[in-house]
Image (cartoon, rainbow, N blue to C red):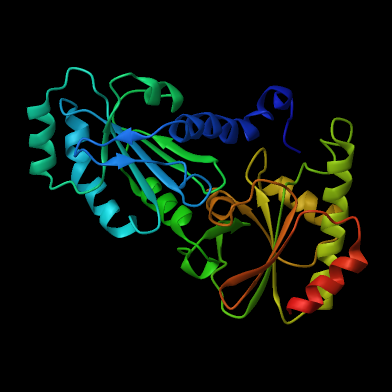
Amino acid sequence: MTSFKYIPLLLPLLYTGKLYASEALEVLKSKNYTAVSGELLSYADVVGESPMYVKFWATWCVPCMQQMPHFQHAYEEYGDKVKFVSINLGVNETPDALAEVIDRFELTMPILQDNSGELAQAFGLMGTPWHILVTRDGRIVHKGHDADATLDKRLALVSARQPSELPAITLVDGEQQNLDIQKQGTQMLYFTATWCDWYLKDSRPEQSQNCIAGQQFFNQLSEAYPTVHSLGIVSRLWTGQTDLNEYREKFAAKHPLAIDTSLDAAIGYGINQMPTLVIIKEGKEVLRINSFASPDKLLQQIQDVM
């Protein structure tokens, strides 16, 4: 079983993403901003309604310029689903240099200039270029310098409004066996962690019991609906194949189980609490359950949507 020697220090990191994003979004919500083009921008109405793609850049930053075509293309593809916040660093800049870059790359998204540095501070700028993706519920799910495949995949994930819009998500079980959870019909997806029941036993006993009750309920549910696609998805945190096998044996789980090795499933389905049961019907989420204390009532709820 995976060693948990350092978990007391690491476990709080599960929650820092949301706290960090909340601080940054409060800065955005606190005032209106004037774009370089002169238009007045207010993000107070956007926060909580739309995902956000925040990018910091500078005209003198070589990789920023190399990535600009990617940024404009992303805006053209996702600008109707994701709020783009383009932030020029405002350091060693001139109006002519800024205008030249906007013209050269035909940038059409609103652009802010962070002359005060408050946005850089709020979003924890680590150097340009700096890409940040924030979900609708205010969780930062991506931070990085590269405009790469990981950024593209996560942008597609956060932009999806319904499961039917999600890109294919690959999970791993056994020797790199890929499980594609993009299926038609009805699906029951149960998100949990292999350590949720025993590691939280003393520090968060109610959550530990909820994890146990949740897995027991999902076992019952998958047996009650044998023709429905049932899949248990466990977090990759402190989890390998051995941990997954031990978890499967401990709970006598007969339904498929897999590890969310890339975090794509958690990001795509907006999972910020474990355990969570998500029921999807014809590409649309019809029910989400986080508490498993009353299984009889839950079964009735599920029967109503099946």
User: Left or right: where does residue 287 sit relative to residue 129?
Assistant: right
Q: Judge whether 231 appears above or below 48 on screen.
A: below
The part of the image, by quadrant, that contains residue 19 is top right
Give the x, y percent position of residue 58: 21, 28
The x and y percentages for residue 217 are 86, 62
Seen in the picture, residue 52 relative to 100 is either above or below; the reply is below
Classify residue 230 by image quadrant: bottom right
The residue at the point 85 percent across, 49 percent down is 210
**Location of the C terminus (image quadrant):** bottom right
Q: Is residue 209 left or right of residue 81?
A: right
Q: Residue at position x 32%, y 23% from top?
A: 127
Q: How many labels does the image show?
A: 0
Q: Position of residue 55 (x, y in %)?
A: 33, 37
Q: Quadrant of residue 104?
A: top left
Task: Tell me the residue at 9%/42% (across/down).
Answer: 103
Of residues 94 and 173, which is closer to you in this image?
94
Question: At 79% across and 51% down in the image, what residue appears?
Answer: 247
Q: In this view, does 48 lie to the left or right of 210?
A: left
Judge by depth and name the residue closer to the eye, 72 or 115: 115
For the N terminus, which image quadrant?
top right
Residue 209 horizontal side relative to residue 227, left or right? right
Q: Where is residue 149 in the image (x, y as percent from the top left)?
A: 35, 49
